[in-house]
Image (cartoon, grey):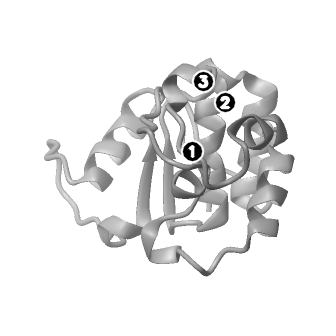
Amino acid sequence: MLLTGPSEAPGTALFRATAGIPTPGTGRIIRPGPDDIVFLKQRPYLPPSTLREILVRLENAGEISDDRMFQVLRELDLERVANQAGGLDQEQGWEKSLSLSEQQLLTVAKILLAPPQVVFLDRIETTLGSEKLRKILRLLSGGQVFKLT
């Protein structure tokens, strides 16, 4: 399920409550465990590492084929990044070698390779633009989009 809407009170309250940040109000929230929720920040953090380490969570190592990783990189127009990095296993300093948009797309690729139950996107459209955002939302949602009002 994908929830979208303005970055006003309802979205902010849902974001905070899901993250476990105390908010005023009453009610009960049942949420997945911390490994099943991803908060994709406006400015991602990519430590120096290999492309494989960026794309595949440690608990999924060995489950995702190289072909699948390259397929997702192609879907997000990141083939150049793999070529520039010299493949999946060369350590890089990503902050210096990639644009902010490319860094953001790498974090999206990681989510697409091992989707958690819940993904929160924090204003990534400011980095990626509306066209890329629509493409990402389609890939993440499998066609289901719900709006917060």
> Is residue 23 rendered to the left or right of residue 46?
left
Front tag of 1 and 3: 3
> Viewer-proximal residue, 110 or 6?
110
Q: Is residue 35 above or below residue 88?
A: below
Mark 1 and mark 3 residues within 8 Å of each other at the beta carbon: no
* Residue at x 68% of width, y 39% of height: 85
Question: In this orientation, does residue 132 appear?
Answer: yes
* Residue at x 44% of width, y 75% of height: 59
As measured in the structure, the alpha-carbon distance from the residue carrying label 2 to the one carrying label 1 is: 9 Å
> Is residue 86 rendered to the left or right of residue 48?
right
Q: Amino acid at mark 1?
A: Thr
**Quadrant (top left, top right, bottom left, bottom right) of the C terminus:** top right
Mark 3 and mark 2 residues within 8 Å of each other at the beta carbon: no
As measured in the structure, the alpha-carbon distance from the residue carrying label 3 to the one carrying label 2 is: 10 Å
Q: Amino acid at mark 2?
A: Glu
Front tag of 3 and 2: 3
Give how far across and how far down residue 25 sits, in percent: 17, 47
Residue 107 got which mark? 1
Q: Amino acid at mark 3?
A: Ser
As measured in the structure, the alpha-carbon distance from the residue carrying label 1 to the one carrying label 3 is: 15 Å
Q: Which residue is mark 2?
A: 102
> Is residue 35 rendered to the left or right of residue 69?
left
Residue 97 got which mark? 3
Please, what secondary structure does the residue beneath circle 1 have? helix
> Viewer-proximal residue, 36 or 51?
51
Q: Is residue 60 above or below residue 46?
A: below
